[in-house]
Amino acid sequence: MAATPAFLKDATDLLSEQGFASSEIWYHGTSSALVNSIKEQGLKRSGDKALKSAAKKTMATIGNSYTESIEPIFLSQSKQLAFYWAEQTVRDRSVRVEGNEQPVVIAVKLPEELNLKVKPDVGAASLLLLKEGEDFMGYLAGIYQENGFGIPEIDLMKADRLKYLSVLGMAYINADIDASYLEIMTG
């Protein structure tokens, strides 16, 4: 895992005892291979067609059927957390798609009517029970500790839904996002 670029390190500004503060700006982590498409088409739910196609081919090869689901667009109020997920996207794509890809963070500035549709990602509870979720919790604990806070504690099965946003920095929107609301973050 690469070090988070300095221009994306925003936990010192966002993190408090209550968790990550939110504003009207959200962030989405992705792969550099998808940037041109995102600039043209915006962020699309379940938008990584190459990865979906590769998964479908793999399932057909082993004799299983593949049912494609429509996933929402995952967001965070933190550039730093979005970078983590961008790295995971690059890693996941490297298994199935050839190329030299880099993590990219996109700022998402939604109009008020769309911003109201952003919800805490309570579905992350199932992810956090897997190895990938354990890795994220370790990364998150490091951010909290670097900023003088204890390791975040959350009971995934009983936590108030807003804790998924404030403590874990996990949100989603179940709508496509037009390219005019997006800005690629650069140093």
Image: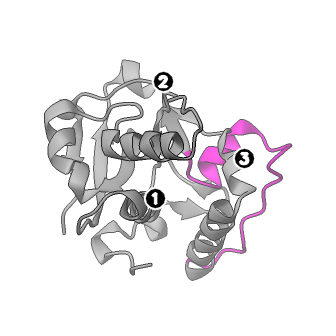
**Residue appearing at x 75%, y 56% in the figure:** 129
Q: Is residue 3 visible?
A: yes
Q: CA distance from mark 1 to mark 3?
A: 16 Å
Q: Position of residue 111 (x, y in %)?
A: 31, 25
Marker disc for residue 125: 3
Circle 3 sits in a helix, a strand or a loop, which is it?
Answer: helix
Quadrant into which the C terminus falls? bottom left
Q: CA distance from mark 2 to mark 3?
A: 20 Å
Q: Position of residue 10 (x, y in %)?
A: 40, 66
Q: Which mark sits nearer the N-terminus, 1 or 3?
A: 1
- Is residue 153 a member of the stretch shown in magenta? yes
**Which span of residues is magenta-colored?**
147-170
Q: Which residue is mark 2?
A: 117
**Residue appearing at x 46%, y 49% in the figure:** 77
Q: Residues within 10 Å of mark 1 (few under 14, many from 20)?
A: many
Q: Amino acid at mark 2?
A: Lys
Marker disc for residue 85: 1
Q: Amino acid at mark 3?
A: Ala
